[in-house]
Image: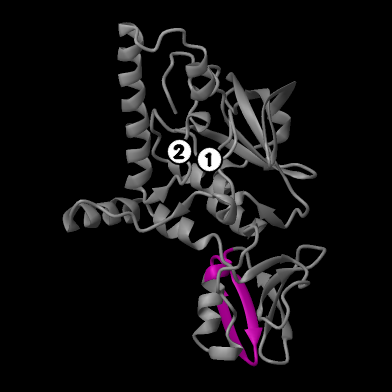
Amino acid sequence: VSAEYDEPNQDITTNRTQGETTLVKVPSGSEAQKEQSNQDAKQSGSYLELDKIWTPAYYGDDKHGMGHRTGLYSDEHGNLKVTVGKKHRTFDVKWNGDRYEVEIDGSRFTGRYLSNLTEDANRVFRDEKSIVTTPRKCASVVYHRDLVTCAGDKQIDKSSLRMCDKVIGKGWFGEVTLAKYTNPSGVKSKVAIKRVSQTSPHALVGAMEVAVLSELAKNPNDNLIRLVGWYLDTDALCMVTEYMPGGCLANYLEGLYNSSDLVQQREFRGFVKDIATGMRALEKWRIQHRNLAARNILLDANKRLK
């Protein structure tokens, strides 16, 4: 089962307001199952990390559109600022190599992620003075430092890739192209590169997809797309995943000549099992797909679905 939802082929995930993979409260059959789901997610730390990487308090580059609200934003150089209070006073947010820091009226606030920093500040600044964290109807963006903190171990060098100039998918985000990747051990393999167009190198659209796939890669599953790595290009956030030569399930089904064939029926039962296995793995980590469709399910060389 692919981690994305809306577009065909190598599509993996969009952002929160456009169908992005998100952490949710997934109903279980019993309280025991629900508690086990919580323990599974917390055991790896992925639930906590993914729940912190995005915050509606961050408005992206500059403060246009913030109106009279308080919040976080980045300037044209990527430097972080926070605006607080009725007078909208602005303070610099620093990164000390381990966490964010900001000093306001003699008080020092810190946080590993911007969401943590916001929570820390809002313990002091309340009501009209607090940093607004109400979700907004806009594309969710993640500050690049938060993405590095969460998924920095999956960041790769663009020089390790040789582009094939073959487009294998398109969507609202941009294109998916074929490439050849050489890992640190010198092993080469075909990969798919999904380029999510960006207007800023600091406020990243689609970064939650990278974060989710990075966490899932720590516990590989045969029915989930494997993230090879990611990198920032001049105008795009690039996600490198394993290449699925079988294309999407929708195209495969359209090419079948007789769906009542016994061999094909056995194959279909295998497909159902693959899909259920992939979705069960997502539920284990309390991740909701939100757009399960044949066009978003891919086949490998052995017709295994992911």
What stretch of residues is rendered in magenta?
Answer: 98-115
Could you say where residue 100 lies in the image, as x and y percent from the top left? 61, 70
The N terminus lies in which quarter of the figure? top left
Looking at the image, is mark 2 or mark 1 earlier in the sequence?
1
**Marks 2 & 1, CB-CB < 8 Å contact:** yes
Q: How many numbered badges does the structure rendering display?
A: 2
Residue sitting at x 61%, y 50%: 207
Label 1 sits on residue: 5
3 or 255, nearer to the observer: 255
Disc on res. 292: 2
Residue 59 in magenta? Answer: no
> What x and y, as percent, mark residue 87?
73, 92
Q: Amino acid at mark 2?
A: Leu
- The reply, left or right, for residue 179 in relation to residue 279 is right
Q: Between 251 and 41, which is closer to the camera in this rendering?
A: 251
Q: Is residue 72 above or below residue 221?
A: below
Is residue 135 in view? yes
Q: Residue at x 55, y 61 (%)?
A: 54
